Image (cartoon, rainbow, N blue to C red):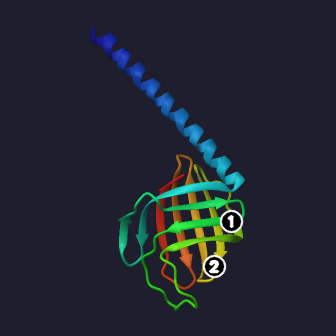
C-alpha cells in the first residue's frame, strides 16, 4: 500500500514538473518574440530609489516599447541636479521617440536592451533586462537627476 502511494506521489510530482517546465518554455518564447518585435509592456511592481530605498508601487505603473516609441509611466523619487527649463512632470511620465536602441546578445535566460530617449525635461537611458520567466528589471539613468530602478513583469 505504501509503495503504491509513493509511486503515485512521484508520478504526480513529475507531471507538475513537466507542466511548469512547459509553461516556462512558452513564456520564454513569448519574451523572445516581444523583444524581437520591439513590442512589449512591463507592469512595474516596485522601485528602488538611490536615496530612499525600495518601495512597492501601485499596479498602474508601466514601461512600454512600441516599435520606435517608448511610453514611460513610472514614479520617481530622487534629487535633480539641474532645474528643468519647463515645469517638471510628476515622475517619469512621457511618450517619446527612441533615439538609440541597443539589444545585447542573449545571455542564458535573459535579454538586455538599452533605450535612449530625450524629452523636453531631460535625456534618459533605460537599461531593461527581461528574463524568460517574464520578470523584468529596469534601470533609468536621467542626465540631470538621480538614477532609479524598477522591478516588474512582462
Q: How many other residues sit within 10 Å of disc 1, few (<14), some (14-19) or many (≥20)? A: some
CB under 8 Å between discs 1 and 2: no
Residue drawn at (62%, 44%) of the image = 30
The residue where tag 1 is placed is 69
Disc 1 to disc 2, C-alpha distance: 12 Å
Quarter of the image for the N terminus: give it.
Answer: top left
Q: Is residue 152 above or below residue 94?
A: above
Disc assigned to residue 154:
none
Q: How many other residues sit within 10 Å of disc 2, few (<14), some (14-19) or many (≥20)? A: few
Does residue 9 appear left or right of residue 142 in this picture?
left
Query: Where is residue 134 drawn, in percent x and y?
Result: 53, 49
Nearest the camera: 11 or 147?
147
Upstream in the sequence, badge 1 or badge 2?
Answer: 1
Disc assigned to residue 119:
2
Query: Where is residue 104 drawn, in percent x and y?
Result: 67, 61
Q: The residue tagged with tag 2: helix, strand or loop?
A: loop
Q: Is residue 52 above or below residue 113?
A: below
Nearest the camera: 59 or 6?
59
Does residue 91 appear left or right of residue 115 in this picture?
left
Amino acid at each position: 500500500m505504501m509503495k503504491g502511494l509513493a509511486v503515485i506521489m512521484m508520478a504526480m510530482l513529475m507531471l507538475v514538473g513537466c507542466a511548469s517546465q512547459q509553461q516556462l518554455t512558452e513564456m520564454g518564447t513569448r519574451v523572445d518574440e516581444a523583444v524581437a518585435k520591439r513590442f512589449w509592456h512591463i507592469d512595474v511592481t516596485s522601485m528602488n530609489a538611490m536615496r530612499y530605498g525600495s518601495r512597492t508601487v501601485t499596479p498602474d505603473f508601466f514601461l512600454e516599447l512600441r516599435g520606435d516609441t517608448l511610453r514611460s509611466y513610472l514614479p520617481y523619487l530622487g534629487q535633480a541636479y539641474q532645474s528643468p527649463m519647463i515645469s517638471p512632470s510628476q515622475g517619469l511620465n512621457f511618450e517619446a521617440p527612441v533615439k538609440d536602441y541597443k539589444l545585447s546578445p542573449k545571455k542564458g535566460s535573459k535579454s538586455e536592451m538599452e533605450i535612449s530617449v530625450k524629452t523636453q525635461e531631460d535625456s534618459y537611458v533605460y537599461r531593461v533586462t527581461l528574463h524568460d520567466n517574464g520578470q523584468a528589471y529596469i534601470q533609468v539613468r536621467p542626465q540631470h537627476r538621480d538614477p532609479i530602478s524598477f522591478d516588474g513583469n512582462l
